[in-house]
Image: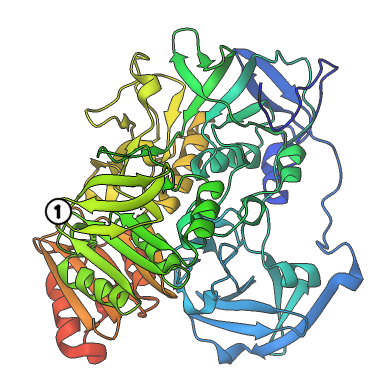
Amino acid sequence: MGGCFSKPKPVEVKIEVVIPEKERSKEEMSPNGKASPLIYKVNGTARHYHLEEHPIASNPYHNPKDVVEASVCHVKDLENGQMREVDLGCGKALLIKESGEFHAVGHKCPHYGAPLVKGVLSKGRVRCPWHGACFNIGTGDIEDFPGLDSLPRFQVKIEKDKVYIRASKQALQTQRRTKMMAKCISLSNYNLSSTNVLIIGAGAAGLVCAETLRQEGFSDRIVMCTMDRHLPYDRPKLSKSMDSHPEQIALRPKEFFRSYDIEVLTEMQVAAVDIKNKTAVFKDGFKMEYNKLLIATGNTPKALSCKGKEVENVFNIRTPEDANRVVKLATSKNVVIVGASFLGMEVAAYLAERAHSVSLVELEEVPFKKFFGERVGRAVMKMFESNRVKFYMQTEVSELREQEGKLKEVVLKSGKVLRADVCVVGVGAVPATGFLKQSGINIDSKGFIVVNKMMQTNIPGVFAAGDAVTFPLALRNNKKVNVPHWQMAHMHGRIAALNMLAHGMEISTVPYLWTAMFGKSIRYAGHGEGFDDVVIQGDLDELKFVAFYTKSDEVVAVASMNYDPIVSKVAEVLAAGRTIRKRDVELFVRHGKTGDMSWLTGKGS
């Protein structure tokens, strides 16, 4: 059986639980004030895990040489609601003043390093200006995604009207903090064919689920299985940074999984799920029993159905090896990309400077028309054309021609014949749920797994998350939607984990995505499906704009390019449950930057 780690031999159980200091006071003390064990039920049997007793140090910095303290400003230098990036000599911190109190945390988003001082501060948290991750300003904890790590938190003190920050030099250098997790010293006395939690799929949803369980003190067995040959990696980079090697885009190093006893079985495909016996059946015949199950299998790329579809050098970008191979074959050659999807457009942008020619074939009239609208789509199309990408719109591929078994030409239904050494297919995807058809788990007509606000399926103990599900979106009055975004998969995994532990947590996050092309990014928040109008502020020709997507009189989504942090500001308004009216943004557009922006500050409707 393929796997990332060898199977543990049955030995005596020895468990250690490590939990955050802020949780110790709650977990360590029983009503009589004495140390109390953590209790988890495993297959109906209560297990007690006693915490290792050690004092909570009043000084969080154990090595004085690793500590720096500096005066960074006068107390009157910052008004409430302001943020400032301050230099402590050996690194920077983000100083925040809210409700009369000062806080200091890391100044860079741990996801891709965005400067948080350019983000949005709202009600105790700061939102990243690039991709929307949110962090609690009091603890530094990550509260919305993408990304896995939290911010380091630094001590702040006021002396003689001066603000001082005391920080670890190491934390100032790394600008990230991994939350403390439960840890099993030895996985023992476990039946190799049974686990407490089984996670099918090792993408963002699966990994965040596993990490959240450990962060919440869960100390029983967790097994993740994946058809991939690699540990979880940053999948969006496959089309944005195509020559990245697996180890460069790994979400966590191998040592992380070993340290927290998260077992990963690679190159393992689940063929069926027996919900009656709580068993997953693998393609090779191996069976594994579970207590709780998360299905996070993502989607499967659609293939072309035309003549010659089996010729060599035709790719779906699914793995790092696929992306690397395409870059190698495309260099100084002719590339045809089928489908102006996010993947197709990002691949076209990446290969434009490397290939001899890049041609893009699309059935619609304009790229991204259904998602960004026609005007934004045309502006993006113009940017691509100025970078040597040739579009063939409102047509399809009728044949792939080969020479000695390898791709030579792509024939379009319009009659046009394109020279092609490599073809990349990006015509959409379908949920990877075929193995569940006879399981009894509720699947809709399109193949998506139906879940509630707690990511639960219709089967007790079975959860689902990520691109393969439809769930109630609070932003759209709990309409069941599919949101195949990287950020949303993270949140799905977290909500599923919390509800495996019976926390009763409901999902309420605002969808947030981004795409990167030719060094420029489009950011997007909300859910614009079915929008009936687009209100645009800025200059589309200069690629500096914000587009508000409206349905009736309500803004349902926003997109921008070179207009930060407007998308994060709108995301915060929507996350607070407030409605942005079409008339408000129309007034904003009419009067430009001098217009009323109370709708962004919470003072409006």
**Residue at image x 18%, y 54%?**
363
Q: Type of residue at label 1?
A: Gly
| Position in image of residue 249 (x %, y %) | 60, 55
Note whether residue 354 is visible. yes
Left or right of 27 on screen, residue 13: right
Q: Quadrant of residue 590?
A: bottom left
**Residue at image x 77%, y 24%?**
187
Seen in the picture, residue 221 relative to 239 is either above or below; the reply is above
Left or right of 334 on screen, residue 245: right
Note whether residue 453 is visible. no
| Most foreground residue, 550 or 560 | 560
Label 1 packing within 10 angstroms: few (<14), some (14-19), many (20+):
few
Left or right of 600 on screen, residue 15: right
Element carrying mark 1? loop
Q: Which residue is mark 1?
A: 530
Q: Quadrant of residue 346?
A: bottom left
| Most foreground residue, 34 or 391 | 391
| Position in image of residue 571 (x %, y %) | 35, 64
| Position in image of residue 291 (x %, y %) | 55, 18
